[in-house]
């Protein structure tokens, strides 16, 4: 089979300019191990984006693979509506043990966006259950990305992605996001940007059901890393104003920030936490909404009022996905992944600090195993980052640009030599593509 020709005949690629794509010799990945991918021609690539931010434990981890195989032999699917199965029960207990505070009730969905949709419906019904149906609005941060369903698009609305459907999207009220790259006070941060949140939430508290944010890093907006203290202050404000707080930890959860969850970094407990991506270590699609017993109890029906949560997914709590997630959590514990991730995180930090000194680099920022670098418009901006991604691919490193931002998001298990190799290729491509 000619894979390239067959691909171009049948496959519709997400986030991909078709005209440009048809002209390039794109890689066709056939296998992977650790932090390396191998294409159909045998060429290897370093996975500099953790395969869309989800392969935190690397590829082909034996324990996760074996768990998937064993589960598929015994039970491949069983619904969770009105019944249960052993794998999803075990996973739910494990998640309640690793998440902050008393988050101990778990609802399962199929992917990140479907998890967010469930959380939105939950918080609106929560207030309806309590007889406060006027609290029905959701507030988000500008530049937010919480998925691509019609409901989740309204929470962020990125013009580059969503302009064609703007006329039918129900847009949420937004708080100006903290953008440290463009803040004159970022080196001595006093969180002046939080005043916007205080003003908007105070004004709209009586009609607001919840605030939803990507804690400490807005991903699709350009890997906008911001202080955990912002999240801490937001938790306090939401409590004071009787507004629920939803933390979208789909991308930043499971060790990405240097802590198990960004909530741990901010030392707070949200009312609802949504996880996905690395929940199964990137092996199978699964997401979860994790909340408190108090929140859950509000959905118990009372005489004259049916409070059942009539929302679900065919693959909610799928046994094979649950087995993968259980195995991933076991790997985190047995292999001390959080501690292990300090190796690539420290190298990433020092590497990007060095990059920040290069002419044409506006600013860099890192947190845990996340990093971002902005190329100034004078040095090429978005055109330069696009060139970087193309050149990096030729050099054996997979990265993706986000406008003038380019980043590295390595698996947490990346070792010292692999991280140095990623940084070396990144450095070379940066020098080749910046116009100064």
Image (spheres, rainbow, N blue to C red):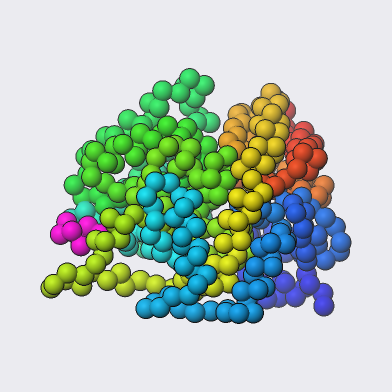
Query: Which of these two is toward me, 214 or 433?
Result: 214
Residue 269, percent across and down?
38, 44
User: From what the image shows, is residue 10 above or below residue 129?
Assistant: below
Quarter that holds the N terminus: bottom right
Taking 105 as reference, is 72 left or right? right
Taking 295 as reference, is 69 left or right? right
Residue lying furthest top = 188
What residue is shown at x 38% (from left), y 26% (from top)?
192
What residue is shown at x 86% (from left), y 61% (from top)?
42
Residue lying furthest right = 42
The answer to whether residue 148 is magenta is no
Quarter that holds the C terminus: top right
Query: Which of these two is toward me, 375 or 216?
Result: 216
Q: Would you identify the image quadrant in which residue 418 lies?
A: top right
Residue 102, percent across and down?
37, 50
Q: Which residues are magenta?
A: 124-132
User: From what the image shows, is residue 86 above or below residue 397?
Assistant: below
What residue is shown at x 41% (from left), y 23% (from top)?
190
Q: Would you identify the image quadrant in which residue 342 lies?
A: top right
Residue 406, percent across and down?
64, 41
Q: Main secondary structure of the magenta part?
A: helix
What residue is shown at x 67% (from left), y 73% (from top)?
69
Residue 296, percent across and down?
30, 60
């Amino acid at each position: 089979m000619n894979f390239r020709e067959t691909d171009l005949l049948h496959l519709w690629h997400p986030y991909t300019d078709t005209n440009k794509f048809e002209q390039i010799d794109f890689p066709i990945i056939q296998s992977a191990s650790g932090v390396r991918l191998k294409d159909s021609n045998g060429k290897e690539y370093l996975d500099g984006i953790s395969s869309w931010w989800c392969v935190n434990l690397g590829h082909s981890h034996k324990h996760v693979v074996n768990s998937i195989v064993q589960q598929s032999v015994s039970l491949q699917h069983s619904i969770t509506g009105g019944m249960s199965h052993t794998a999803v029960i075990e996973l739910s207990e494990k998640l309640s043990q690793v998440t902050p505070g008393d988050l101990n009730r778990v609802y399962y969905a199929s992917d990140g966006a479907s998890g967010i949709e469930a959380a939105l419906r939950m918080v609106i019904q929560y207030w309806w259950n309590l007889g406060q149906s006027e609290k029905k609005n959701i507030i988000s941060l500008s530049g937010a990305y919480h998925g691509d369903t019609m409901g989740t698009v309204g929470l962020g609305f990125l013009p580059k992605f969503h302009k064609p459907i703007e006329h039918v999207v129900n847009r949420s009220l937004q708080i100006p996001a903290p953008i440290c790259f463009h803040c004159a006070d970022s080196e001595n941060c006093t969180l002046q940007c939080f005043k916007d949140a205080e003003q908007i939430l105070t004004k709209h508290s009586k009609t607001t059901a919840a605030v939803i944010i990507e804690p400490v890093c807005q991903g699709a907006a350009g890997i906008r890393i911001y202080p955990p203290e912002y999240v801490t202050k937001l938790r306090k404000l939401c409590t004071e104003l009787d507004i629920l707080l939803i933390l979208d930890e789909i991308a930043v959860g499971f060790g990405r920030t240097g802590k198990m969850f960004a909530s741990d970094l901010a030392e707070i407990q949200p009312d609802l936490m949504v996880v996905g991506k690395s929940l199964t270590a990137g092996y199978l699609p699964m997401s979860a909404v994790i909340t408190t017993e108090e929140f859950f109890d509000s959905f118990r029906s009372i005489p004259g009022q049916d409070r059942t949560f009539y929302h679900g997914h065919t693959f909610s709590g799928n046994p094979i996905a649950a087995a993968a997630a259980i195995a991933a959590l076991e790997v985190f514990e047995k292999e001390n992944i959080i501690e292990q991730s300090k190796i690539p995180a420290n190298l990433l930090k020092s590497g990007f600090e060095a990059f920040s000194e290069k002419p044409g680099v506006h600013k860099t920022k890192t947190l845990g195993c996340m990093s971002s670098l902005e190329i100034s418009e004078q040095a090429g901006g978005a055109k330069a980052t696009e060139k970087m991604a193309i050149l990096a691919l030729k050099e054996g490193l997979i990265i993706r640009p986000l406008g003038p931002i380019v980043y590295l998001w390595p698996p947490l298990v990346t070792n010292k030599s692999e991280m140095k190799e990623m940084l070396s290729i990144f450095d070379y491509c940066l020098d080749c593509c910046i116009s100064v």
